[in-house]
Amino acid sequence: MSKEQVLDLLPEIEEIKDQALKEKVIACWEEAIAYRNWTNDELRSIPFTLLADNVQIHFIEHVRTCCRMAIAVDNVQEQMYGARRTPVNRDYLVAGSLLADVGKLFEYDKKEDGTIFKSDYGKSLRHPFSGVGLAFKHGLPLEVMHIIAVHSKEGAGEKRSPEAIIFHHVDFIDFELVK
């Protein structure tokens, strides 16, 4: 998997202004994709969740949609409230949005016929945990790992950063509307 293939899948990575952060996000995706030799076509066609039947939204669509929704929320908040609002680090918001579900590439596996199923790995560790581990390995900032860690049910009861609040809600909007 090359950097260009990752950027083809996730053009929103270009929204990250900090070049070092951008490279770390790409490295996480490259490693996760290589783990099971996912192809770009597979990543564009696998369901974004295995928790609902007949899911018509695909994994990469979900990742990109949630990232764009998070950016849109940040834009509206900034336009409406300006300096009065809680500051949001846009680079962390985008990086966390793009990496929140990267652990699903460890959680999922594929049969020879293309059927996607929850792997033994996924039965033991859900994607927020493997995503944080991958982000840690690649030197992502604590603030980005926090978004990954608390975006799903595992973050219930935890105090979320502004970036994590935004992502948590857009992720659940997309999930709830699909299931």
Image (cartoon, rainbow, N blue to C red):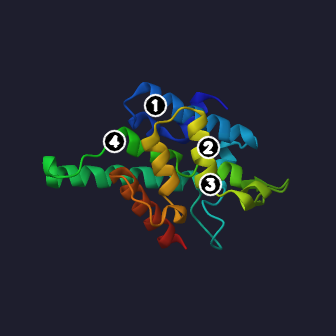
Give the mark toward the camera: 3 or 2. Answer: 2
Q: Tell me the distance, in whole angstroms, between the alpha carbons under discs 1 and 3.
A: 21 Å
The amino acid marked with disc number 4 is: Arg
Report whether 39 appears left or right of 148.
right
Where is mark 1, residue-wise?
A: 21
Q: Is residue 103 left or right of residue 78?
A: right
Q: Secondary structure at mark 1?
A: helix
Q: Which residue is mark 2?
A: 133
Q: Which residue is mark 4?
A: 90
* Residue drawn at 36 percent across, 56 percent down: 166
Q: CA distance from mark 4 to mark 3?
A: 23 Å
What separation in Å lies between label 3 and label 2 (alpha carbons)?
A: 10 Å
The amino acid beneath tag 1 is Leu
Q: Quadrant of the N terminus?
A: top right
Question: Which residue bears the numbered disc 3?
Answer: 127
Q: Residue furthest front?
A: 158
Q: Nearer the viewer, residue 27 or 55?
A: 27
Label 4 residue SS: helix
Residue 38 image point, x, y percent: 72, 44
